[in-house]
Image (cartoon, grey):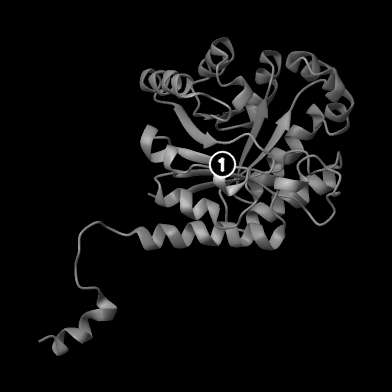
Amino acid sequence: MKAYIIGEAGSCHEGNLELAKKLIDMVKDASADAVKFQYYHSGAAVAERREAPQFAEMYERYRMPADWLPYLHHHATILGLDFLCTTYMEDDIEVVAPYVPAFKIASLEAMNTAFIEKHLQYGKPIYISTGVLTHDELLRLVALRSQHRQIRLLHCVSAYPCPPEQVHLSVIRRYGLDGFSDHTGHPCMGALAYMEGARIFEAHIRHERTSEKNPDYPHALGRLHWLEYTRNIRTAELALGTNTKETQPDEAVYRQYMS
């Protein structure tokens, strides 16, 4: 099955619309399938929801205005990319709904049943990240997926960046998860996740103009690593092949030397 690869712009647009468009161009250059942004109407509202007032100023500084949505959607569409956008509050779902073919729900909302149900009303695919969840909580999501075929579950570790020893890609196969939301910043990790059964991928990207002080900078892939990341997944698609052992075309000539 072909991988579906999402380039996550996150806050790496630095509050600049032209830089946001350049991130979309980066996704296209890597032959990925979708670009994703994040929308919330107020940094203070997100901070209040998180009970984290210390982050209110930062949230507001990197907030994407609602009036960017039609421009970014158009730019992605003319490049042949899907445009996706995560929200964190119920009131914001209807704002992004007209622009997205599928929704993305972040890990910290993964156990919010009312929030998920609000998305379900639109009848579109829903990708849900599973960072910070326990075994029992993940099983609840797996059960919910069995009731709603539009739900797809992405393995995730909510560490920024996530060290390799904590990523535990074998979780994907054990729980039958659909994909991988990657915070490792490692260009090989997506390909490894593909071999564990992931078919939907999300990785953060950053532009050369993204500041090193940006909160997404440490776990985001720069241009060259992003290109490598997507190439590695496409190579994994080819390499997995079928599970039937047969003589391959490029080795057939050597059969004449068998004893």
Give percent across and percent down for residue 87.
68, 24
> Which residue is identified by label 1?
166
Residue furthest out toward the front: 165
Residue at image coords 66%, 18%: 94
Residue furthest out toward the left: 259
Disc 1, SS: helix
Give the number of callouts: 1
Query: In the depicted view, which residue is nearer to us: 229 or 161?
Result: 161
Describe residue 193's horizontal placement relative to residue 165 as left or right. left
Residue at image coords 66%, 32%: 85
Residue at image coords 79%, 14%: 48
Residue at image coords 47%, 48%: 193
Give percent across and percent down for residue 23.
74, 50
Describe residue 161's horizontal placement relative to residue 110 as left or right. right
Give percent across and percent down for residue 29.
65, 59
In the displayed structure, would residue 190 be above or below residue 69? Answer: below
Residue furthest out toward the top: 114
Callout 1 amino acid? Gln
Give percent across and percent down for residue 36.
65, 39
Report crowding for label 1: few under 14, some 14 to 19, many 20 or more residues within 10 A (C-alpha).
Answer: few
Give the position of the C terminus as an image quadrant. bottom left
What is the quadrant of residue 144 in the picture? Answer: top left
Q: Is residue 256 visible?
A: yes
Describe residue 215's horizontal placement relative to residue 149 as left or right. right
What is the quadrant of residue 82 in the picture? Answer: top right
Q: Can residue 2 be seen in this view?
A: no
Query: In the depicted view, which residue is nearer to us: 58 or 122?
Result: 58
